[in-house]
Amino acid sequence: MDRRFFTFSRATFFACLLALIALLVIPSRSARATDVEVLTAKLESSEEGYRIVAAFSFELGHELEDAITRGIPMYFTTDVELSRPRWYWFDEKTIRSSQTVRVAYNLWTRQYTASINGSLQQNFAKLEDAMALVLRPRRWIVADKSALSPGATYNASIRLKLDIDQLPKPFLITSLNNSDWRLSSDWKHFIFRAEDK
């Protein structure tokens, strides 16, 4: 047998083996990027409008927890979308609403802080207590009463993600190369019927 053929075959074998290993490793890394689970997602009617009720489940990775305790703030954003399907035309314009919880550690006071949309800052002794505002975000108005047609059915979607765009630039570069920093849930879809008049 020609020695060049044997060398080529062995090189091809190792290249295929590396490609196979990469295929097995990549899905497991991407799965870690979407390890946020949506436990609860529903809309409730109030006098002011329609409020989102949500709960999530996830654990911070070691790198994220370490970054927070070093004073790097993390921004967790809950996105909500509402659209009304129409059989005769495109869906109605989508209503979008977001709430961002900023979690940080104050090195001087040795307390964790959490603020919602840049206000309502609270202090906590433990990181778990600050993260409770992320896991169970405060109910907020996602649509006014007048924005939804009474008795109409809407497609609603919700997700939670770590907003890496708000990270300091050195950490933004790190987050692009590390799946631990790409923390996000999949969109959770549910049907909602607006209240009748």
Image (spheres, grey):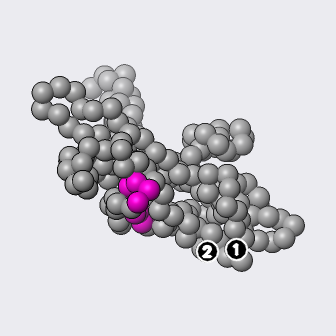
Residue density around tag 2, few if under 14, some if 14–19, many if 20 or more, within 10 Å: some
Quadrant of the image containing the N terminus = top left
Q: Which residues are magenta?
A: 47-56
Whether 59 is drawn above or below 142: the answer is below
Q: Position of residue 35 (x, y in %)?
A: 42, 58
Q: Nearer the viewer, residue 38 or 59?
A: 38
Q: Is label 2 in a helix, a strand or a loop?
A: helix
Q: Does residue 128 appear to the left or right of 87 in the view shown?
A: right
Q: Residue at x 72, y 70 (%)?
A: 123
Q: Residue at x 49, y 47 (%)?
A: 98
Dominant secondary-structure state across the stretch colored magenta: strand
Q: Residue at x 48, y 67 (%)?
A: 136
Residue 122 part of the magenta-drawn span = no
User: In terms of image quadrants, where is residue 169?
Assistant: top right
- The reply to whether the C-beta atoms of the residues labelled 1 and 2 are less than 8 Å apart is yes
Regarding residue 150, the answer to whether it shows in the image is yes
Query: Earlier along the polypeptide chain: callout 1 or callout 2?
Result: 1
Three-letter code for the amino acid on which mark 2 is drawn: Asp
Q: Does residue 168 appear to the left or right of 53 in the view shown?
A: right
Residue density around tag 1, few if under 14, some if 14–19, many if 20 or more, within 10 Å: some
Q: Position of residue 167 (x, y in %)?
A: 67, 44
Q: Is label 1 in a helix, a strand or a loop?
A: strand
The circle on residue 20 is none
Three-letter code for the amino acid on which mark 1 is drawn: Phe
Q: Nearer the viewer, residue 83 or 162?
A: 83
Residue 50 part of the magenta-drawn span = yes
Q: CA separation, marks 1 and 2?
A: 6 Å
Instruction: Give the number of callouts.
Output: 2
The circle on residue 129 is 2
Q: Position of residue 28 (x, y in %)?
A: 39, 53
Q: Position of residue 59 (x, y in %)?
A: 51, 67
The residue where tag 1 is placed is: 124
